[in-house]
């Protein structure tokens, strides 16, 4: 009995001393388990004189109640504490700077092509593609370019199969062959633009690359004139370069157009005069070749030149992107240097 009274007195300190759920479990076993003092006394009750039993029984019940209450309260406290610590450890500091994941973006060449095509789509043109490995027939013959033309030399054109002029295969030197391919497959009217890669046997330098991009344009209808060509290209230039870039047209020669012209834009770098590195001081930069479709081209595809007329143009994508953004060396387009390219995302 005295031992029990002493244990009840100690109990609050003992329970307080359990600092984890695990040690509390052990203490619970010590105080209330099968080997506990209480359990021992309980077993002895039967051997006690009948008169003492109720008193002993009550003392045991009271002690049991005290222990159980203390333990339950402590357990609740410890569990709350454990949860609080877990939450504190898992806490997310929402003020930390976010992790950055690199995000892809469109290459300047691709976005330039898309933008130009959008402008022509707005004018009712269709966008079509053609093969990069092309026959000499479509690349040259269909476009009124005779077998003796210097551009057909191996020094200018990259041939995949060379020798017999009747079945030459080459890497197309321009996107113009799609003029012939499209007209062969479709009756007039035709309004198409053709973006794509083109290839030439050039040594890379600041202004040359053996691979670059062009966008070809072709419009065929009844009564199209040079004014329609000029108006279309002036509209394109205003949309693409903005109202302050001026254009001019100069006579030129292409085998597949007659008359032929080249279109210039005012220089982005100097606006004329001085010793500009970009335009050489003339104040103008050549943007594209163009002209009225030669009747021989119409005849080759089976169109009647007395019933239809049309114009065509071909622009260098790198060139117009350079003029628009003031990017100078051509290699910036192919180096894949994100410090350059990300400026145009
Ligand atoms: N194909 C020419 C070139 O690569 C560009 C060109 C000039 C295309 C005049 C045309 C045109 O359609 O009419 O230099």
Image (cartoon, grey):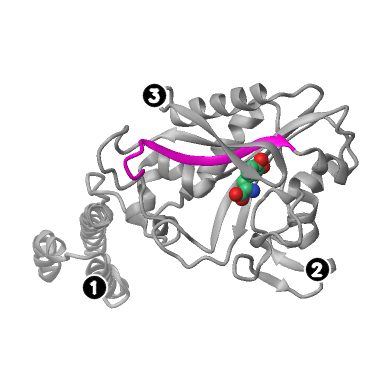
Which labelled disc corresponds to residue 55?
A: none
**Residue 289 counted in the magenta span:** yes
For the residues bearing labels 3 and 2, Cβ distance under 8 angstroms: no
Residue at 64% of width from left, 58% of height from top?
173
Q: Give the range drawn in magenta.
A: 279-293
Q: Mark 1 points at which residue?
A: 30
Q: Is residue 258 above or below residue 82?
A: above
Disc number lying in front (2 or 1): 2
Disc number lying in front (1 or 3): 3
| Figure label count | 3
Residue at 79% of width from left, 29% of height from top?
309
At numbered mark 3, what does the secondary structure look like: helix, strand or loop?
Answer: loop
Q: Name the residue under label 2.
A: 165
Q: Mark 3 points at which residue?
A: 244
State which tag comes first along the sequence, 1 or 3: 1
On-image quarter of the N terminus: bottom left
């Amino acid at each position: 009995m005295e031992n029990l009274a002493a244990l009840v007195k100690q109990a609050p300190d003992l329970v307080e001393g359990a600092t984890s759920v695990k040690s509390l479990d052990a203490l619970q076993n010590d105080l209330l388990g099968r080997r506990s003092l209480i359990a021992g006394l309980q077993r002895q009750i039967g051997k006690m004189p009948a008169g003492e039993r109720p008193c002993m029984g009550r003392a045991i019940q009271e002690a049991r109640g005290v222990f159980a209450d203390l333990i339950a309260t402590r357990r609740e406290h410890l569990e709350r504490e454990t949860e609080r610590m877990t939450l504190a450890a898992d806490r997310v500091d929402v003020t930390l700077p976010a992790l950055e994941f690199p995000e892809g973006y469109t290459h300047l060449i691709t976005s330039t092509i898309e933008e130009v095509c959008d402008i022509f789509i707005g004018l009712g043109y269709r966008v079509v593609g053609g093969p990069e490995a092309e026959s000499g027939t479509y690349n040259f013959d269909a476009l009124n370019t005779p077998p003796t033309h210097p551009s057909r030399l191996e020094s200018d054109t990259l041939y995949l199969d060379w020798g017999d002029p009747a079945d030459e295969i080459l890497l197309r030197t321009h996107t113009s062959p799609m003029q012939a391919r499209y007209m062969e497959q479709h009756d007039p009217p035709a309004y198409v633009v053709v973006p794509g890669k083109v290839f030439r046997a050039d040594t890379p330098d600041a202004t040359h690359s053996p691979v670059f991009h062009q966008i070809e344009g072709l419009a065929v209808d009844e009564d199209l004139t040079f004014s329609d060509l000029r108006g279309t290209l002036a509209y394109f230039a205003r949309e693409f370069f903005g109202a302050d870039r001026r254009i001019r047209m100069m006579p030129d020669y292409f085998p597949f157009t007659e008359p032929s012209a080249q279109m210039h834009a005012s220089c982005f770098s100097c606006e004329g005069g001085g010793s500009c590195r970009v335009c050489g001081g003339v104040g103008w930069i050549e943007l594209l070749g163009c002209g009225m479709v030669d009747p021989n081209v119409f005849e080759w595809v089976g169109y009647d030149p007395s019933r239809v007329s049309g114009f065509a143009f071909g622009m260098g994508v790198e060139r117009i992107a350079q003029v628009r953004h003031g990017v100078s060396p051509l290699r910036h387009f192919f180096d894949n240097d994100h410090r350059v390219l990300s400026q145009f995302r």
